[in-house]
Amino acid sequence: MPDPKGLVFTLVESGPNISEEEYHDWYDNEHAPARLTIPSFYNATRFKACDGVKPTSLTLYDISEPRVANGPEYQAVFANGSDRDKRMVSTLQYLTRRSYSVIYSLSHPEASAFLPPKFVFYVAMEVKPEGEAYFNKWFKEEYIPMVMKIPGWLRSRKFTLEEHILFRGCVKPEVPVYKHLAIHDFSSDGYRETAEIKAATSTPWQNEVMKNVVGREMRHFEFLKVYKCPEMTQM
């Protein structure tokens, strides 16, 4: 599989009008597999929230490049979905779909043996335009090297938002959408309580950088299921 240059990031809250059993059956056996028939959609991994915050479901699709996220092949899959697929999408309490460009990715030398990760921690930020260069310098030169020292760290990826589509929005408070996204993968839980993560989030340089940050969201999820494209399943 070529290195993905894009990401589809989907947050879902099934809501009170769909049973948990039907939601999982639809997503596992119909919704995600249909999208992985698109050659430029390489895989998908679904996570469930472990931070007590809604939306409670996150799916990450590695894609060849951002433009395929809503390209003709995706639109065809979406339009030709089954009656149940259309009904479920229209019944979900909350559904937001974002596409991102991959800026860079750093991995532990043995990360491939532990991916998909058991836990993901994502941070999304909005930065004043005049502060973006300084923010990016801090992020790459100080923050990521410190995150890499956290026990259980596997991988860190940085993304830039390309497009955001809100299909349904009934989750309160409103889920923010910010330009900068970092996703950190871990092989085990407990990283939130480590001295290393506290050190990474409390430096003098970070305090300076945060003066230009006008919005921030942090979420924690644990692994639920991985989906692979049909070609990889047959290997």
Image (cartoon, rainbow, N blue to C red):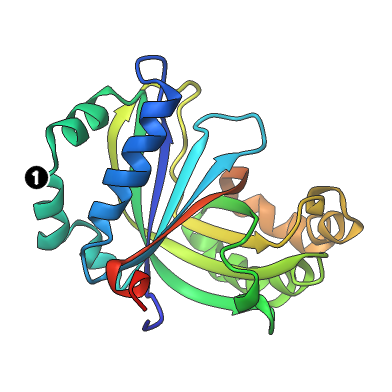
Q: Quadrant of residue 31?
A: top left
Image vertical order of residue 19 relative to residue 119, above or below: above
Q: Is residue 231 left or right of residue 176?
A: left
Q: Which of the 4 image quarters holds residue 230? A: bottom left
Q: Quadrant of residue 66?
A: bottom left
Q: Is residue 18 left or right of residue 190?
A: left
Q: Position of residue 205 (x, y in %)?
A: 77, 64
Q: Picture coordinates of residue 28 (x, y %)?
A: 37, 45
- In depth, the one of 31 and 51 nearer the eye is 31
Q: Residues within 10 Å of mark 1 (few under 14, many from 20)?
A: few
- Name the side, left or right, on which 204 lies relative to 221: right
As rendered, which of 198 and 51 lies closer to the eye?
51
Q: Residue at the location (74% across, 75% down)?
A: 145
Q: Which residue corresponds to the image point at 56% horizontal and 60% vertical from the top-left?
A: 182
Quadrant that contains the N terminus: bottom left
Along the line of sight, the residue nearer the viewer: 41 or 214: 41
Q: Can you name the residue that lies furthest to the front here?
A: 234
Task: Farthest residue to the right: give it.
Answer: 195
Which residue is disc 1 drawn over? 79
Q: Quadrant of the C terminus?
A: bottom left
Determine whether, in the image, residue 117 is placed left or right of residue 163: right
Residue 77 in percent (x, y) is at 14, 52
What amino acid is labelled 1 in the image? Ala
Image position, residue 173 (x, y; %): 50, 23
**Residue, x 32% and y 26% (percent of image)?**
92
Front residue of this view, candidates 201 and 212: 201
Looking at the image, is 158 positioned above or below residue 88?
below
